[in-house]
Image (spheres, rainbow, N blue to C red):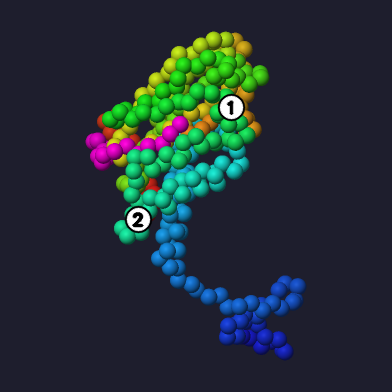
């Protein structure tokens, strides 16, 4: 409905809307129309939202290894995860069908392109799944050329983080983390094997990050910054089987159960 004020109209007239601005000028706009989303559009929207949520959960669980990241990292990582979901989506069943290696394209993703980890760690860590044991193997290192210390640093904490995300059941658990030290005065660092116990039906994304320090006696000064923080993804695998949670933890016996949480946003 339009209103006549003197010789001026304002409001709705058929398919157009007349509005008055604060400066007194009038603008004419098309009437807003409501559109119904197609099934294809709704699917795309749901996958987009799920991809962003899953990518965020992965980043959170890998935060111990990631440390600092470049400004475009979140968008780059979201894109990779969304591409995986699009590839695994089955239109006929309206469901996601994953293989053990569906997320393998995440391997070698760099979290800080200003300081790629491959420029500082010149051997490739290996991820191996044996039953419910996820092994991360860092090969023997010869300090220079295999492992590089930037100027001003003399010790490094190597952190490995692994996610535990059950996409099928929309459940998440706490991340798995392990770390070890490498010092610049070491000529050789022996092969390091880290073993994590993981659940069935879980997305396990493993990342490795390097945190450098300058240590003088008992004081360590961090060398990492937004412009320098090497970290990347070792690999990603979906563990086989069906996850069945153990007896839930209680206030009196918190260690009896696994710490799994509902995450409704992970549902398609």
Residue 259 shown in magenta: no
Q: Is residue 219 visible?
A: no
Circle 1: element type = helix
267 is higher (above) or lower (below) than 126: below
What residue is shown at x 55% (from left), y 29% (from top)?
A: 117
Residue 118: x, y in percent?
Answer: 55, 28
Residue 128: x, y in percent?
Answer: 36, 28
Which of the two labelled residues, at mark 2 and mark 1, occupies the earlier sequence position? Answer: 2
37 is higher (above) or lower (below) than 130: below
Residue 268: x, y in percent?
Answer: 37, 54
Numbered badge on residue 177: none
Range shown magenta? 234-249
Q: Give the quarter of the figure containing the N terminus.
A: bottom right
159 is higher (above) or lower (below) than 81: above
Give the residue pinned by disc 1.
119
Residue 238 shown in magenta: yes
Specify the quadrant of the image occupied by residue 202.
top left
Q: Is residue 157 visible?
A: yes
Q: Main secondary structure of the magenta part?
A: loop
Give the residue pinned by disc 2.
90
Specify the quadrant of the image occupied by residue 134.
top left
Residue 120: x, y in percent?
Answer: 57, 24
Q: Is residue 184 left or right of residue 244?
A: right
Circle 2: element type = strand
138 is higher (above) or lower (below) than 200: above
Work out whether residue 177 or residue 187 is closer to the camera in this orientation and state it. Answer: 187
């Amino acid at each position: 409905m339009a209103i006549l004020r003197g010789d001026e109209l304002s409001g709705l007239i058929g398919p157009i809307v007349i509005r008055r601005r604060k400066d007194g000028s009038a603008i004419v706009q098309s009437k807003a129309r409501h559109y119904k989303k197609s099934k294809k559009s709704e699917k795309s929207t749901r996958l987009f939202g799920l991809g962003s949520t899953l990518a965020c959960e992965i980043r959170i669980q890998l935060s111990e290894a990631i440390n600092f990241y470049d400004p475009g990292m979140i968008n780059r990582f979201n894109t990779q995860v969304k591409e995986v979901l699009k590839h695994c989506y089955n239109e006929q069943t309206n469901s996601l069908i994953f293989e053990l290696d569906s997320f393998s394209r995440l391997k070698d993703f760099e979290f800080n392109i200003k300081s790629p980890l491959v420029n500082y760690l010149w051997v490739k860590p290996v991820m191996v799944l044996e039953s419910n044991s996820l092994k991360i193997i860092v090969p023997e290192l010869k300090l220079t050329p295999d492992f590089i210390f930037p100027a001003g640093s003399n010790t490094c904490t190597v952190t490995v983080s692994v996610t535990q995300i059950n996409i099928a059941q929309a459940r998440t658990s706490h991340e798995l983390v392990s770390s070890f030290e490498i010092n610049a005065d070491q000529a050789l660092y022996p092969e390091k094997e880290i073993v994590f116990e993981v659940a069935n039906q879980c997305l396990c994304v493993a990342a490795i990050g390097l945190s450098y320090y300058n240590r003088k006696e008992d004081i360590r000064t961090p060398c990492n910054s937004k412009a320098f923080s090497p970290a990347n993804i070792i690999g990603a695998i979906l563990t086989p089987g069906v996850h069945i949670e153990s007896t839930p933890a209680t206030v009196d016996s918190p260690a009896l159960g696994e710490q799994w949480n509902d995450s409704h946003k992970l549902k398609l």
